[in-house]
Amino acid sequence: MRSARAILLLCVAAAGLAVPGCGKKGPPLAPLARVPGRAMDIAARRTGDVVAITFTIPSANIDESKPADIGRADVYAYTAMGQNDVRDPRRMTLVGSIPVRKPLEPGAEDAATKKPGPPPPREPGLDQGAPVTVTETLTADMLVPLAPDRNAPARVQAEPVSWFGMPLARPLAGPVPAPEARRFYVVYGFSRGGDRGAASPRPSVPLGRPPAPPLQPRLEATEGGVQVHWTVPPGARLPYQERAEGGVLDAVPRGMESAPTLTYEVYRVSPDGPAKLTAKPVSALTFTDAGVELGVERCYDVRTVTTQGSASFESAPSPPACLTPADTFPPPSPTSLAAVAGEGAISLIWKGVEAPDLAGYVVLRGDTPSGELKPIFETPIRESTYRDTSVKPGVRYVYAVVAVDRAAPPNRSAASNKVEETAR
């Protein structure tokens, strides 16, 4: 009896201890809100007064979960002295709003056939992970910088270098350019519920004068196409040190503002408008256009591109240069020519050549080693063998072979090796 009573008291005590810990309700937790991740690959490029902003629509949320909960991507712009001067999107200019559709899901199962049905119709907009290009045309109003936000961080001013109170000049540091306003761009992704994601990086473009274009390029026709050559624009500001190559680390300038990277774009000019030939700006001062048709005029211009970070600025075009490439390039020479004498004939064999416009071969013959070699026939033959039946018994002949192309007039290669043989 006493044992049963002890057990009952123990259960009541345990229940009394459990009630405060398990039955008490805490404050409600906020629902997990997923917002789209940042557009990390944003870049801006200015050509004249037009700025092209490129980026990829995020395909993951900020917590890296996929697919992203994104309904649209908005591109904003603002002009300021520094990128942190303006952080409030309400003070920025909306450049473009790109709707983003839901990822395609498989259709629901058909109740009758128990097979997947057709996918639902697609929403308007772009897919997650799609590349986007938005353009903005600069106006005079856009050149005026906005005042910094109230809570914008102060820009750090470099303190003058001194020694015992005496100012010292910075070594290897040229004149510090005056600060200039720039046009900044930023992308925000918005969830389907309207929650704004984190800001993308903020590339900018300069608002000053564009870089100077190169002088008129020089054109040269080669077997590989038309080579376009140009020089560095007059007065261009160059880096203090050229970029390192061959596995050598780049130098990092300290205490000075490095010049922007100087590269170039090559355009083919036609009545239909300019067509860019370079997949990306090139640093070399030459470019070969392999897609040319012989006998057709081609015109080109070159434009300077200055790049700082992910922003670039393209100059006006250089004066155009034109060239009509002609086929003046002979095919390779035949090799390994050999001769065998027979009754009333001399047989020749040689190693042929590979050329896209090869018309054939012409055999040259002379009566003596010191005699002039002349073609036995004018119409080229395609075979790499020939039997000369016009020989005279006892006469020693010398032979060579040339390759001929289909140009008008045809181009002839250099002669092959010479061989001698006496007819029987």
Image (spheres, grey):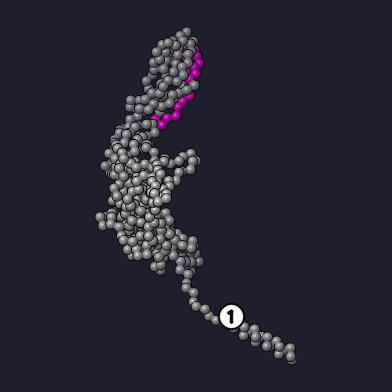
Instruction: Give 256 or 287, whichever is nearer the viewer.
Output: 256
**Name of the residue lying farthest toward the left:** 140
**Name of the residue lying farthest toward the top:** 394
Q: Please give the name of the residue rendered at 48% of the width and 24% of the height, measured from the top-left corner.
A: 351
- The spot of residue 292 in percent (x, y) is 35, 36
Instruction: Give 98 or 232, whichever is nearer the viewer.
Output: 232
- The spot of residue 382 in percent (x, y) is 43, 26
Segment colored magenta: 337-357
* Up/down of 361 relative to 123, above or below: above
Q: Please give the name of the residue rendered at 74% of the width and 88% of the height, measured from the top-left corner.
A: 3
Dominant secondary-structure state across the stretch colored magenta = strand
Q: Please give the name of the residue rendered at 34% of the width and 36% of the height, measured from the top-left corner.
A: 231
Residue 344 is one of the magenta-drawn residues: yes
Q: Amino acid at mark 1?
A: Gly
Other-residue count near label 1 (Cα within 10 Å), few / some / many at <14 / 14–19 / ≥20: few
Quadrant of the image occupied by residue 409: top left
**Name of the residue lying farthest toward the bottom:** 1
- The spot of residue 84 in percent (x, y) is 37, 59
Instruction: Give 62 or 412, whichever is nearer the viewer.
Output: 62
Q: Please give the name of the residue rendered at 46% of the width and 19% of the height, measured from the top-left corner.
A: 417
For disc 1, the marked residue is 21
